[in-house]
Each structure stands twice: as structure tokens, then as C-alpha cells.
């Protein structure tokens, strides 16, 4: 179940923009419009969400960012450098943003466990990637990798002991 999705530096979205299904504390329509999660941080999630705003405010780009993230994850093993260049469409109305990576992060609830997965990429490669798992209220970083510009190499943080199987 989707808890939230956020995008930064993607098309018209310069700053972090989030689509959240976390319900407010208002309990008026909770029985028909919300799903219980048994999570302390997000005890109720809404069954649906609305994205609204004025024309050209980034509504379509937020949904398109979720599609781009899904496609990059699904095709990650087959991507070539040119594919990253096609998928990389940063905010171009200020000079600093057009050189910064695009960043996506998603929070999911699967079988009662919350997963927070995200990555940052530019026109050449994945610059950072991470997975945090919340089996308890305190998250466990299962893996994290970053691109080291100075050494031109990918660096990995030590894998979590909870991340079993082939790495």
C-alpha cells in the first residue's frame, strides 16, 4: 500500500513535492474513507487522494514522476547511459537546479512492514540509492550507495545484518 511519494528537481518540481495518503486526525469519515495500518507514525491511510491546483502548477508532473520512478526501477538492470539522459529532466529555470540530481522517494506498507526506498540520478547514472525498513518504530538502513565524484567510484555503506540473501 502506498503511504507517500516525493519528487525533487523533476521537470517543474524544483523543491520536494509529496503525494501523501496519511490521513489527518479528523475522524469524521474514518470508517468509510480510511484504512487502519497499526503504524504509530501513520495509523490511518486514506483510500484515495486528490491532486488539485491552478493550471501549470505541477499536478501532471507529480504523477509523471511516479511513473518515471517505477519505470527506472523496473528497467534498472537494462538501462544504458543514454537511457538516464532521456529520463533526466531537471528543473531548468535556475542554473543550480539544472546540474543537481533528480530525487525520488517512496514509502510503502507491505505485510505490516514499512519500506522507505529512494534514489537520486542525473543524466549519467544513479548518484545515490537507499532502503530503510521499519519493522519496529526505529528504521534499519538495509543498504545505501553513493557515487563518489572525487574518486569516480561507487561506494557502499555496510549492508545491514537484516538484509539476508545474495547482495
Image: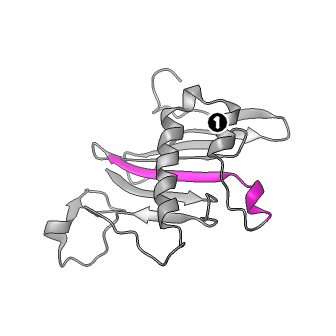
Tell me the crowding category of disc 1: few under 14, some 14 to 19, or many 20 or more residues within 10 angstroms, Cα based.
Answer: some
- Res. 81 in view: yes
Residue that sits furthest to the front in the current view: 55
Quadrant hosting residue 31 = bottom left
Which residue: 31% across, 57% down? 39
Residue at 64%, 65% (x, y): give it.
14
Which residue is the site of mark 1?
A: 83
Residue 105 shown in magenta: yes
Task: Give the magenta-colored segment's residue range.
Answer: 95-109
Give the side of residue 59 with respect to residue 92, left or right: left
Residue furthest toward the left?
A: 31
Residue at left 80%, top 64%? 95
In the rendered image, the vertical position of residue 154 relative to residue 121, given as above or below: above
Disc tally is: 1
The residue at 82%/34% (across/down) is: 152
User: Percent from the top left, x then y, of residue 87?
Assistant: 62, 45
* Percent x, y of residue 125: 69, 38
- Place residue 79 in its image quadrant: top right
Amino acid at each position: 500500500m502506498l503511504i507517500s511519494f516525493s519528487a525533487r528537481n523533476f521537470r517543474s518540481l524544483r523543491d520536494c513535492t509529496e503525494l501523501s495518503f496519511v490521513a489527518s486526525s479528523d475522524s469524521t469519515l474514518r470508517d468509510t474513507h480510511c484504512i487502519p495500518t497499526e503504524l504509530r507514525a501513520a495509523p490511518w491511510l486514506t483510500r484515495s487522494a486528490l491532486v488539485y491546483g491552478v493550471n501549470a502548477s505541477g499536478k501532471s508532473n507529480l504523477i509523471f514522476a511516479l511513473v518515471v520512478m517505477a519505470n527506472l526501477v523496473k528497467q534498472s538492470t537494462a538501462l544504458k547511459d543514454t537511457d538516464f539522459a532521456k529520463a533526466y529532466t531537471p528543473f531548468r529555470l535556475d542554473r543550480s537546479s539544472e546540474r543537481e540530481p533528480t530525487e525520488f522517494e517512496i514509502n510503502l506498507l507491505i505485510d505490516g512492514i514499512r519500506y522507505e526506498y529512494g534514489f537520486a540520478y542525473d543524466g549519467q547514472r544513479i548518484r545515490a540509492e537507499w532502503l530503510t525498513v521499519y519493522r519496529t518504530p526505529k528504521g534499519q538502513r538495509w543498504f545505501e550507495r553513493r557515487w563518489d565524484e572525487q574518486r569516480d567510484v561507487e561506494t557502499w555503506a555496510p549492508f545491514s545484518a537484516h538484509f539476508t540473501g545474495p547482495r
